[in-house]
Amino acid sequence: MKHFHSLVIADIQRETPDSVCVLFDVPETLRDEFSFVQGQHLPVRADIGGETIRRTYSICSAVSKDALRIGVRIQPDGRFSQYVSNDLKAGDQLDVMPPIGHFQTPLDPDNEKTYMAFAAGSGITPILSIVATTLEEEPKSRFMLFYGNRTHESTMFLEDLYALKNQHPERLSLHFLFSQEAQECEILNGRLDNENVRELYKTVGGDKTPDEVFLCGPGDMIDTVNNTLIELGMDATKIHSEHFVVESREEATERKPAELQPAGAEDETSVTVILDGHRK
């Protein structure tokens, strides 16, 4: 069973005005336990103001890189993200659980596939790992990425994405959409809504249907893109998604379980859980 380990923070870098990238120093004794697959995430834990608070952040590193990095979007009322941004520094320690998650598809050097990804905001974090790893491990495959943000300044991992583009100019296609910053190409203005997704899919994707599609962002964006792709004829089993939610000060911390209610209690509630792209 996986459990938390105290890892030293090797570095914290400002990614955008409201996001940071955290690099962990993994000791040799834990290398195997913290080995990861593209698209996985790390549960992290800290005592903040007398409360033990847990969050989960996606790994943004390529599998081949000897680095364990997560991207953290800082929320105005986010207790954990504010703690990471304002209090943590290189040399400090943070409780981290080994990687988990199944937001990926098996890779094979002999594959010659066309992949497509749609990301919004910090949803780019696992997508970056997926894109970088896929391009490295499948030299005959190509990737198309559509990435939505408010503005150029708020876009996470721009330098990493441009570096990947320089490494794989013929196999990586980058398309940035901004909802609050006008661009010359009209199709790249606005959000990843039904109309934009349809136009991008037909214009950029051409006649070739992608073999696999990855979606990561807030729930409404995931549902919109997923439904639009299915309407366009995409096989639903080839669409892989991972939702994220914005942390807030009101989010639950680790507490004692509530007292169980008897079956049929009036306050009984139905809950939908989305884990690793699977809805239950």
Image (cartoon, helix red, strand yellow):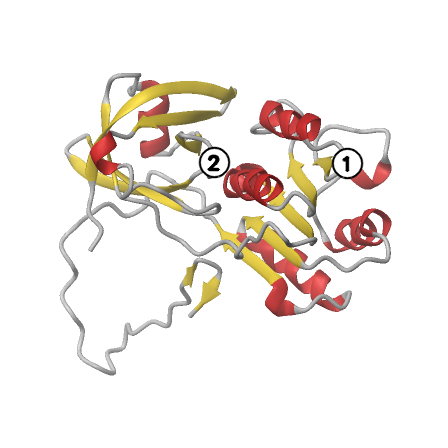
- The type of residue carrying mark 1 is Glu
Q: Classify 240 as above or below 37.
A: below
Circle 1: element type: loop
Which residue sits furthest bottom? 264
- The type of residue carrying mark 2 is Ser
Which residue sits furthest front? 110
Q: Name the residue under label 1.
A: 170
Circle 2: element type: loop
Left or right: 8 in relation to 234: left
Residue 182 falls in which quadrant of the image? top right
- In the foreground, 145 or 255: 145
Left or right: 234 in relation to 28: right
Label 2 Cα neighbours within 10 Å, binned few <14 / some 14-19 / many ≥20: few
x, y percentage for residue 221? Answer: 61, 52
Q: Classify 204 as above or below 46.
A: below
Q: Classify 116 as above or below 131.
A: below
Q: Which residue corresponds to the image point at 32% horizontal and 33% vertical from the top-left? A: 80
Q: Distance between the residues labelled 2 and 1?
A: 21 Å
Q: Residue 146 carries which label?
A: none
Q: Residue 64 carries which label?
A: 2
Q: Classify 87 as above or below 218.
A: above
Residue 189 falls in which quadrant of the image? top right
x, y percentage for residue 252? Answer: 28, 48
Left or right: 107 in relation to 48: right
Q: Which residue corresponds to the image point at 48% horizontal and 47% vertical from the top-left? A: 39
Which quadrant of the figure contains the C terminus? bottom left
Residue 174 falls in which quadrant of the image? top right
Q: Which of marks 2 and 1 is nearer the N terminus?
A: 2
Which quadrant of the figure contains the N terminus? bottom left
Label 1 Cα neighbours within 10 Å, binned few <14 / some 14-19 / many ≥20: few
x, y percentage for residue 52? Answer: 19, 39
- In the foreground, 159 or 256: 159
